[in-house]
Amino acid sequence: MKSFEEFYNQELKPAVDNLEKERKKILSWSIFGFLFLMFGLFVVFSYFADASYSLFFIILGLIIYFSLAGFFLSGFKSRFKSQVIDKIIKFLDPSLEYKPKEYLPFEVFKKSLLFETKESVNRYTGSDLIKGNIGLTSVAFSQVHAEHEETHTYTDSQGRTQTETIWYTIFRGVLFVADFNKNFNTKVVVFPNSEGISWFDKLFSSTLRNLKPIKLEDPEFESLFNVYGEDQVESRYILSTSLMRRLVELWNRFKEAGAKDIRISFIDSYIFIAIDFRKDLLEPSLFSAIDYNRIVDYYWRVKAFYDVVDDLNLNRRIWGKT
């Protein structure tokens, strides 16, 4: 198999060079357009004494500017994903499917039981769905963004009642689901034990309230996570000593890459992993050069999730599961 550097030089470099030229052009026009807009607004303020005219031209100018900027940036991102990210994924594994505008459905998010909080999800979006079979294991993962809406009513300085809507992020990161290598009937959830805070204490779901704390024999794992399950014996069958060690290593690796926390669940013979990154991992930046080092970074981001199957030994089928 050719090295990634060889693959880059043969398959990606021409497209990367063109995309870098396009990025610079869009950035230049964006800066020029912004300066032109500011100059135009200055002229409007100077020429029109009527505030309503000034406000009209301000709004119109902003709408035109951001509409054009969004149009060109959207096309640039689309070309980047089709010409670079898609080829990186095919280099890793030609059998994988990549759908940049799709994401894991909300039903999968709910089934994971990792976000059964009092805060209902009112908006759910995502991108960059990657799915397929890695060896014997069926996998799918994507960016997802789950938000909760709250409406606040207050009285302003003039005594008028005002209402504002605030969106709070429940989860933003990568949701990963894979066929587990053991058959099981119980439910097990693993929450981060950040600064001694038990995530389970925040949950109210009747499904999760049936779970009980699981006592394990790995001090390092228990220092990082709180584990809850329906059955002590089957929970330990799922969370073997080797799997706990691999999960700790997996979390350390993602933490070094900037992850905020990780949550894991085992439901209906599937493993769900939610890794909070608070950013879109496969989006190109208009303010960062697209070069070999940047493309290598995207490659390792994809490979980190692709390697989860090997990291957790999910292809090892010695428990009678095929």
Image (cartoon, rainbow, N blue to C red):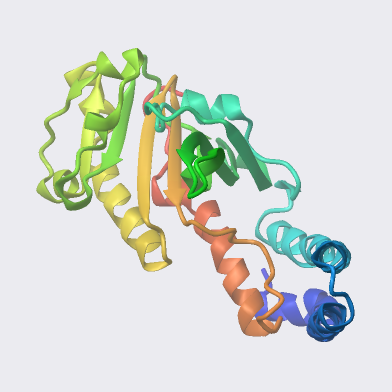
Q: Position of residue 68 (x, y in %)?
A: 88, 66
* Residue drawn at (67%, 63%) of the image: 283
Whether 108 is drawn above or below 276: the answer is: above
Taking depth in this image into account, of 56 and 98 the one nearest to the observer is 56
**128 sits to left or right of 79:** left
Rendering quarter of residue 37: bottom right
Whether 306 is drawn above or below 228: the answer is: below
* Residue drawn at (60%, 36%) of the image: 124
Asked if one can make out residue 208 in the rendered structure from this viewpoint, the answer is yes
Asked if one can make out residue 186 in the rendered structure from this viewpoint, the answer is no
Rendering quarter of residue 129: top right
**258 sits to left or right of 149:** left
Q: Quadrant of the N terminus?
A: bottom right
Taking depth in this image into account, of 121 and 5 the one nearest to the observer is 121
**198 sits to left or right of 113:** left
Rendering quarter of residue 182: top left
